[in-house]
Amino acid sequence: MSKILTNTHTSDNIPLRWLIMSIKGNYTVVKSNLLNEMKNSRISENEYKLFCIYLSRINPKDPETSCVTFTLQDYGEIMQIKRPRREELQRHAESLIGKTITIDNDNGGFSTYALFILFELSNKDGEWVITVDSNPGLAPYLFKFRNKFFKYKLYNTIYLDSYNQMRIYEILKQFEKIGERTIELGDLRKFLGVKETEYPVWGIFARDVIKKAQKVITERTDISFDFEPIKKVVNGKRRVTAVKFKINKNCGYIDQLCIESFLNKDVVAAENITDDGLFEDDSFIKRWEEEYPIEDNNILSFYSDACENEFNRSEIQVLYDLLIKVISINGEDTDRYDYLRRKYHEMEMRRPEKNRFGYLKKLIEADIVASDGEK
């Protein structure tokens, strides 16, 4: 009997389904060096993950692809909203549109840009979606840059735990081929969006920001790094003024594209992995299973998760029987899960005051009737 790895989190902040989607979709972020040098951003962790996903969805050769649309379910999962409502989405829109980044100019000046200019909630063909569009002023940094860029697989950033970790990964990944990078301490703080009043002592900054990132980046991405402080005499005292990073290809890291060979959408059949010759030993599988708790093969618990565990087992059984009529028994459980998740979010948007289970059931039954009418 295979075990199901349900829609638990790979870290506290990104659902397993999104990690799998980024791997299976082979999403790649292509980023100009100038954009990567952005400073003083106060973007939240989830907003920055949204931006990374946005970058993986646009075509850097085509400015016409600047509008990117997410299903309400996908947006909710990225931003960690369990039950997205109009008022909360309005707050998200205002927060995202208000975020700015600063890019230094060659002449010693700087330019500050709003990151996004559009956040739109709309209903398309019966499904609620979120559309975002970037600031046209950023077009030279997002599109048609002919050189001075780098790229990485999306899962390297969305798999990390904080904005600091994502930015440290990016500013080092940019210099991976060179193998080292020295950054003034003040600039490093600005790259990470860390104020002077935060972690004011070097030892605390090194311990709580750099060393923590070093551990997680080594465990979860395709690079690793070492670092050393550079000290100079300032006002008669030796102080840390810069940090020198040594950047290495992470030889101990198994490219997560290999996961494609044993992932069946959101299901991991652990006993089918160890004998396929992909790995020299089963250490990677053990690490995967330890990090992501594996539940028993209980399909009702799997579908209950799509409804935020709101309904009892008998009600989930009724919904499951309806789902089989929408997506046949030969279909994928993850397709039915995604469908049920969409319908649950649709119900949330409509805000039924009574009998939420009955309301959700009728939404699914309406689709079944419509489907039968088309046959």
Image (cartoon, rainbow, N blue to C red):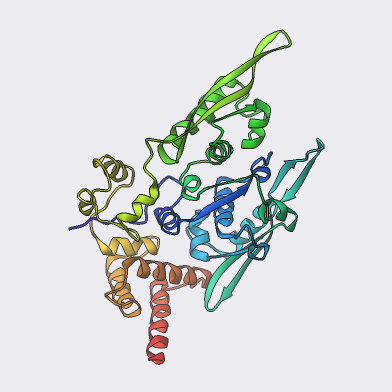
Residue at image coords 60%, 71%: 122
Residue at image coords 81%, 35%: 108
* Front residue of 269 and 13: 269
Image quadrant where residue 181 sits? top right
Asked if residue 53 lies left or right of residue 339, the reply is: right
Asked if residue 158 lies left or right of residue 331, the reply is: right
Image quadrant where residue 234 sits? top right
Relative to 188, say whether 77 is above or below.
below
Question: Which residue is situated farthest in the left direction here?
Answer: 1
Image quadrant where residue 134 sits? bottom right
Residue 360 percent location from the top left of the image: 41, 74
Asked if residue 106 lies left or right of residue 224, the reply is: right
Residue 63 percent location from the top left of the image: 67, 62
* Front residue of 229 and 260: 260
Residue 290 percent location from the top left of the image: 29, 42
Relative to 276, say whether 216 is above or below.
above
Residue 340 percent location from the top left of the image: 39, 70
Residue at image coords 37%, 52%: 8
